[in-house]
Image (cartoon, helix red, strand yellow):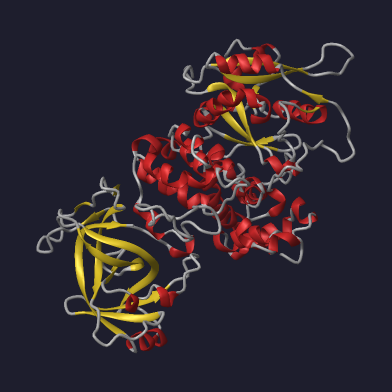
Amino acid sequence: MIASGWCISMVEYMQEKLPLQAQAFAFSLGSVRTFQDHSICKDDVSTGCMLSRVDETFKTKHVEAGCACDFVSPSTEDVVQKLKDGLIPIITIMRPVDDSGKFELVVDGIELSDRGPYGVCPYFAVTHVWSDGLGNPDGNALPYCQIARLESLTRSLRGTFVDNVSRNHGTTAYEAETVAFWLDTLCIPVQKEHQKLRDFSIQKMQEIYMAAGGVLVLDPDLQQLSSTTRPVEVLSRVLTSGWRARLWTFQEGMLAFELLIPGQDCCFTFSSEEDLFFQDMAQTEIVERLLLETLWWNYSDSKGNSLTKSDISKEPVRAAWVLLKAIAHRRTTRPGDETICIATFLGIDPTPLLKTPPGERMPVLLSLLPAIPAHILFTHGARLQSNGYRWAPQTFLSPYGLLDSDQLSLPLTYVPDTSKPDARVPIPGPFLHPGGLGLAVYFPALRIHRSSNIKPTPEVFSVCTLANGTYLVEARDTGTKVTWPSVAPDQMEHSAILLSNPEYGRISLLVEVLGETTEGEVIAKWKSIVAVDRLGDFLEDASIDKAEETCLEGGYSPFRWWVID
């Protein structure tokens, strides 16, 4: 695929997330992005697709190369005034009433809390990747050809939910028989004197996408779709689009009441699996149906649903976990945007982050989280260097963060009394230690006893316990650029392995034990991620033999509080 022009970052995503048949199908469809030169993307795969990044040379694009039509903008004064009034500006494209052929952009203001009987407001929000050409760092304007294309797209929304909502409101758009929209390029002032209004818009980002009657996805690959395109191709193109790979578009898709996929003369909306199949099920071949099911599973991770949105306020730990899993496959041009995007998705006021230098925002974000998932301990990548936060990664974005290949699944309950195996209770949630010592978590562990005859610990070894048998331990590449010999158990006076699974271990965490607090919490330092399996499980003989060459004495420690830095 790389030889055929695909970006290496997209290929790596497909290899991790999509089965071979889905990869082969995507390859057969091709992509407009394969006509670009992605050779520079191979120099450093951690940066993602270099062609999707925006720098000071970025220029707003026209629909067709060589077009030189004039730019069109809404009234900046109207946009600014709406924001000053605490409203969100939305745009209606008014068709020309004479032979001038000129569209007019009319600005209305909307109160996001006034969602009416439908639970949404009468507008759609546009989600796009700036590098595709719809961004404009110099003004709230777009080329006339882009405005004309947007006007055409609004016509493709006839019959959709947001169209029906719009028709039941006495808005400017209703009177013009169209649908109003919100687009960052036109609705967020770029002038320096309006920085406070820009910050206000960012604070409202979650609400803007949640309140919209739909979220319209703009991407070059999706614009090739037509009314005759089968759902299997639509889903494949969405999953392999540049839109799917960017950080900001994650929340824009996940918060959507309905995701709108516009084509040349149509608009696709898939709310459930039933929407994927044609009425005549016999026309959908079994191979296509199986592929659809696979693609739908991944597509669901990119679109909003009521469960995810309710989790944001009701189950913040689960919401954060969903977020961290998804953004491990995404990137952003400006690293400082990562924490802002995470905060706005989770409904956290980003003001403290906006006031903090970009390189210092991650600890601030972690301190603002209403709940912290313990999964963060098992993320890949270099760690923060701030005291009390050295357990956390510098970034959650690709190629680091929570990797699907680790198949991490933390239990929700445990058995405090082994004599009553059916009496399970919830595991207490993690929290930042009030003394600034680190992240407090409730885990079982293997305590490793330091031998008097210290030898270098290899990357595959075993820990022998009297009560729980022997555990096979394998070092993992954590992306920290710290070598195993420098963090191996032989380098520490006291060490332990926090087990993600009390029965089997699986992906686990090697820590250096430093002592205990007066409350009996174990104070420890984050060292490395390891894979743990109990011997007796199905393992390759070669791994067992190698592990038994270095067997460290240890003991099983049941669930207790650990404070990790």
Task: Locate residue 80: give its quadrant.
Answer: top right
- x then y, percent, for residue 428: 23, 49
Tell me: residue 15, above or below residue 541: above
Tell me: residue 196, above or below residue 356: above
- For the point 49% across and 21% down, the residue is 118
Could you tell me if residue 173 is visible in this image? Answer: no
Residue furthest out toward the left: 419
In the depicted view, which residue is nearer to us: 210 or 375? Answer: 375
In the depicted view, which residue is nearer to us: 495 or 15? Answer: 495
Task: Locate residue 280: give its quadrant.
Answer: top right
In the depicted view, which residue is nearer to us: 315 or 301? Answer: 315
269 horizontally vs 148: left or right: left
Tell me: residue 245, above or below residue 159: below
- For the point 47% across and 34% down, the residue is 350
- For the point 20% across and 57% down, the residue is 521
**Quadrant placement of the N terminus:** bottom right
Task: Locate residue 525: give its quadrant.
Answer: bottom left
- For the point 23% across and 77% down, the residue is 449
Could you tell me if residue 472 is visible in this image? Answer: yes
In the depicted view, which residue is nearer to us: 519 or 12? Answer: 519
412 horizontally vs 319: left or right: left
565 horizontally vs 98: left or right: left
- x then y, percent, for residue 73: 75, 22
**Quadrant placement of the C terminus:** bottom left
- x then y, percent, for residue 193: 63, 23
398 horizontally vs 500: left or right: right
- x then y, percent, for residue 41: 70, 59
